[in-house]
Image (cartoon, grey):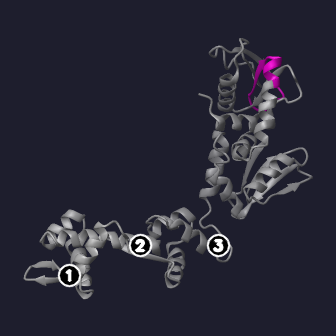
Amino acid sequence: MIKSKEIAECVGLWLAEGDNKTDREITFTNNCFELIIFFSENIQQLYKGHNKPRIYVYSPTEKILIKKLGNFVVRNYVDKRANRTYFIFKLADVEFVKKWRSLVNSMKNQDEYYSDILRGIFAGEGNIKHDLKNHNSRNVRIASGSRNSLIEKILSSINIKFRYDQEKREYWITGRHLYKLEKIKIASLHPEKESKFRSMINSVKERHYSPGELKTILQCELNQFKTTSELANKFRKSDLRILEVLRELKKENRVGYIKLKGHTYWMKKEIKDKYLYKERIKILKQVNKNKNMTAIGKTLNLGRKAINHRLIKFEKEGLVEKRGTHWMIKEKANTLLGIDESGSEL
C-alpha cells in the first residue's frame, strides 16, 4: 500500500538533495544511508517498470563499504575530497521521471502535505545550531541558495516565523517557534539531526510564552484530566508557575479540580460538572441498594473517606440521610435518579 505521508517526505528529500534538472533518471544524494534506503523503498513503491535502481558509494578511503544490496546495482568509488562517505541513488526511466515530476508538482500545491515535505527538505538541507555554553544560542537552519517560495509558504502556513540570511544563504528559526517544529517532528527522518534536535529541545528548562498565551494553552489542554506535574512537564514550566495560572483560571470559573486517590486533577469547569453529576448518580444508585460506605467505595473504586465526604455533602443538599450505620436516599434523590433514567442530564 502506497503511503502518501512517506511519499510527500520523499518529495521534500528530492527537492532538497535530488537532481531536478535531468529528465532521464530520479537521483537522490545524501551521506545518511538510512535516508537513501527510505527514499529508494518509497520510490520503488511507485515504480512499475523493470529497470534496476543503482546506488553509488563515494568514500574518502578505498575500503569497500557495500558489496551487495538487494536488487540494487552497487558501485563503489573513492572521493578523496569527501569528508565522509556519501551515497547516490539513481533510477533511470524517462517516463517515470515525467510521472514523478507531475506528482511532485501536485503535492507542492496541497497544504495537507506541507509538514511532510518540510520534514524531507530539512532532512536534506537542515541543520541544528545549539551552543551548550550559550543557552540563548538555539536555532534551526535550512540551507537555500536563494529565497525559496515553497519553504516560505510552508513555514507561513504553520505560523512559524523565520528570517532569511542572504550572506549565509539559509533560513533561521529560533525561540518559541522551535516548539512548533518539534510538534511536526521536523528532524524525525534523519537519526543524527533528530538526536541533536532532541538534545537542544530538552536543554530548555522552561518555554517562554507571550502574556496570556500560557493561560489560553492550558485551558485548551484541559479537555482531559491533567495533573499539575503533567502540565508542567509538557509545557516545560515549573509546577509553581502552572499552579499559579490554573488558580487564575479557577477564579474566572473556567477550570476546576477533583481529588482522586491522592492526586489532584484539573479540567475545564464543564467537564468537572459533568463528571461530578455522573459520579453523584452512581453513588446515589449504590446507596439506593442499601450498601454501606465500604461496599459503595469498593463498587465505585473510591476510598471510604472519599465516599464519606461525598455523602456528607449530599446530606447537606437533602439527597440522603443516615440511619444507624447505613445511608438512605431521600425523595429529592429519587427525583434526580428518575431524571437520569429518562436520559436527561443536568
Q: CA distance from mark 3 to mark 2?
A: 23 Å
Q: Using residue 43 as the reference point, say whether residue 232 is left or right of it.
A: left
- Residue assigned mark 2: 272
Q: Is residue 84 above or below residue 261?
A: above
Q: Using residue 75 as the reference point, say whether residue 81 is left or right of it.
A: right
Q: Quadrant of residue 59?
A: top right
Choose the circle earlier in sequence order: 3 or 2: 3
Which of the two residues, 274 or 295, is positioned nearer the viewer here? 274
Q: Residue visible at 54% across and 78% down? A: 245
Please name the amino acid that badge 2 sits on: Lys
Q: Is residue 165 visible?
A: yes
Q: Residues within 10 Å of mark 3 (few under 14, many from 20)?
A: few
Choose the circle earlier in sequence order: 2 or 1: 2
Mark 3 vs mark 2: give the one in front.
Answer: 2
Please name the amino acid that badge 1 sits on: Glu
Q: CA distance from mark 3 to mark 1?
A: 48 Å
Q: Using residue 8 as the reference point, say whether residue 232 is left or right of it.
A: left
Q: Quadrant of residue 32?
A: top right
* CB contact under 8 Å: marks 3 and 1: no
Q: Secondary structure at mark 3?
A: helix
Please name the amino acid that badge 3 sits on: Glu
Q: Is residue 134 visible?
A: no
Please provide percent x and percent y for residue 36: 69, 28
- Residue assigned mark 1: 331
Q: Is residue 57 above or below residue 224?
A: above
As drawn, the residue found furthest toward the front would be 342
Which of the two residues, 132 or 115, is positioned nearer the viewer here? 115
As drawn, the residue found furthest toward the left would be 324
Bounds of the magenta segment: 80-98
- Residue assigned mark 3: 213
Please provide percent x and percent y for residue 179: 65, 58
